[in-house]
């Protein structure tokens, strides 16, 4: 299995998870970066991030390379914003929709409060898939016990491996 982790991380939680998944699976990583950063502190962070997520915005991304033919699995990683995924993933998915067809897909979300299941449902809908090969929810992994986070990531990676064998 050759996998690619496509993720957006504002506060570093999704980035931490992506790095640890890559370490365990050998997956490549593709961090999405927006051309115009979202506010990352205080009220503006939640207002503009939430508004952008709810409105289905598609922010411009900094240039990236996605060689779809190299991968049979794409893992999406995102923070949960207003019970949905972060808008940079929408941009990536819509820009690469045809290349993503026929790929095995998995996803993980990082959040502080709630909305993880709604975020998964909305991501599945955008991707036009009924289920993911594996999915994982992490509550602020940078703030949690490393062993606990690594155990959850290990379970996620095992589910990915089992999906490959099926």
Image: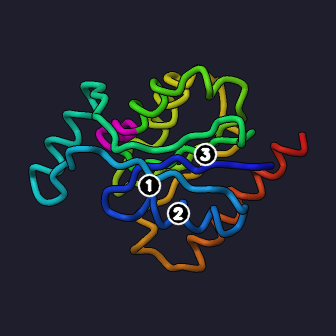
Quadrant containing the C terminus is top right
Label of residue 110 in the image:
1
**Viewed as shown, does residue 64 lie left or right of 10?**
right
Q: Residue at x 90, y 45 (%)?
A: 165
| Front: mark 2 or 1 | 2
Q: Earlier in the sequence, mark 1 or mark 3?
A: 3
The reply to whether dot 2 and dot 1 touch (C-beta < 8 Å) is: yes
Highlighted range, magenta: 81-88
Label of residue 17 in the image:
2
| Front: mark 1 or 3 | 3
Helix, strand or loop at mark 1 = strand
Q: Is residue 157 covered in magenta? A: no
For this orientation, the residue located farthest to the right is 165
Helix, strand or loop at mark 3 = strand
The reply to whether dot 1 and dot 3 touch (C-beta < 8 Å) is: no
Tell me where residue 139 appears, x and y as whole percent.
44, 61
Report how far apart the C-alphas of labels 2 and 1 lie in the structure: 8 Å
Tell me where residue 5 appears, x and y as whole percent.
58, 50
Tell me where residue 113 appears, x and y as whole percent.
34, 53
118 in relation to 29, above or below: above
Q: Residue at x 65, y 36 (%)?
A: 68
Residue at mark 3: 75
């Amino acid at each position: 299995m050759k996998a690619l982790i496509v993720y957006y991380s504002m506060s570093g939680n999704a980035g931490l998870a992506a790095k640890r998944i890559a370490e365990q699976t050998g997956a490549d990583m593709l961090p999405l970066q927006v051309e115009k950063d979202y506010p990352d502190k205080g009220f503006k962070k939640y207002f503009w991030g939430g508004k952008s997520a709810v409105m289905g915005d598609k922010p411009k991304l900094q240039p990236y390379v996605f060689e779809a033919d190299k991968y049979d699995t794409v893992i999406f990683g995102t923070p949960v914003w207003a019970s949905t995924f972060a808008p940079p993933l929408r941009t990536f998915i819509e820009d690469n929709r045809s290349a993503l067809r026929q790929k095995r897909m998995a996803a993980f979300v990082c959040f502080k409060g709630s909305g993880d299941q709604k975020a998964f449902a909305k991501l599945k809908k955008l991707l036009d898939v009924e289920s993911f090969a594996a999915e994982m929810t992490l509550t602020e992994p940078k703030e949690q016990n490393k062993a606990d986070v690594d155990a959850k990531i290990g379970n996620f990676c095992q589910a990915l491996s089992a999906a490959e064998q099926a």
